[in-house]
Amino acid sequence: MSTLNVISGQFGLLIHNLVKGNLNRAAKLSIYALENAGKYGLNICMQDIIEELANEQALKSGIVNSPSIFPGIGTVVSFFLLGTENFLILEQGVKLSLVLLLMNGLRNGDDNLEEEVIRILGEAYELLDKTDKADVATITEQYVTRVLPPQYLSKGFNRLLSKIFPTRNRILKLLPVFGIFYAAFEGYAMTVKVGQVALKRMKRGL
């Protein structure tokens, strides 16, 4: 079994654990949001949840990248924390996807809940488009390809890494002061994108 297959399997397990770990929190958020749906409408409540979690992620990303304010050692620390920031964005995407899916009628225990979360993330990270029929295993493999060091992967690594996280983006995050705001913006934008993809998939009937 190749290293990529092994790590892809571990990533699938990670998503499973993120879904499991965020399900109770997502359920509470969905119940809270649905309480206002009768007054403001379901669509507005979903948009409010997307905005709330996006702002929350912007704060997290800014805090994680805050060492970059100190040139030198702070830049080095921020470089090594890029992986942590990416993980937090991924986790927030999982939580937001769960909230929206639960608000849309899926229930804890539904067989396709976890698969829908992965497909939402796959489309949001542009690992597939809305017409792709890629299975969950393919999506997880595509995502994993961009987080492994290049010595572990095929020559396609750099191409995927540049597509999903362009070098310019990684460099901008390391700039003193500006990097904090850029990281916050990217965390916000990616979370909003996950939410918008989820809404579009719901309109298409998942």
Image: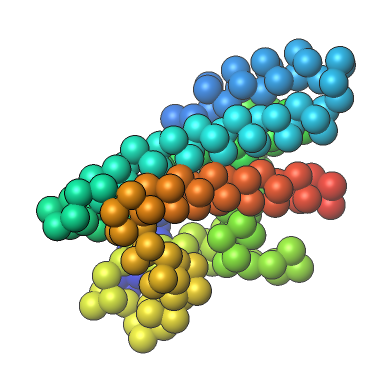
Which residue is painted at 53% across and 28% down in the image? 23
Q: Position of residue 87 (x, y in %)?
A: 38, 47
Q: Quadrant of residue 72?
A: bottom left
Visible residue check, residue 160:
yes
How many marks on residues?
Answer: 0
Q: Is residue 135 above or below residue 111?
A: below
Which residue is painted at 69% across and 36% down in the image? 101
Picture quarter with the N terminus: bottom left
Which residue is painted at 38% across and 62% down in the image? 172
Q: How is the image coloured?
A: rainbow
Name the residue nearer the viewer: 88 or 131.
Answer: 88
Name the residue nearer the viewer: 124 or 166.
Answer: 166
Visible residue check, residue 206:
no
Name the residue nearer the viewer: 24 or 149.
Answer: 149
Q: Position of residue 175 (x, y in %)?
A: 31, 59
Q: Residue most toward the bottom?
A: 155
Q: Is residue 114 above or below residue 137?
A: above
Q: Position of residue 159 (x, y in %)?
A: 44, 81
Which residue is painted at 65% across and 36% down in the image? 50
| Residue 55 placement, left or right of 105 | left
| Residue 84 placement, left or right of 41 | left
| Residue 128 placement, left or right of 44 | left
Q: Position of residue 144 (x, y in %)?
A: 41, 63
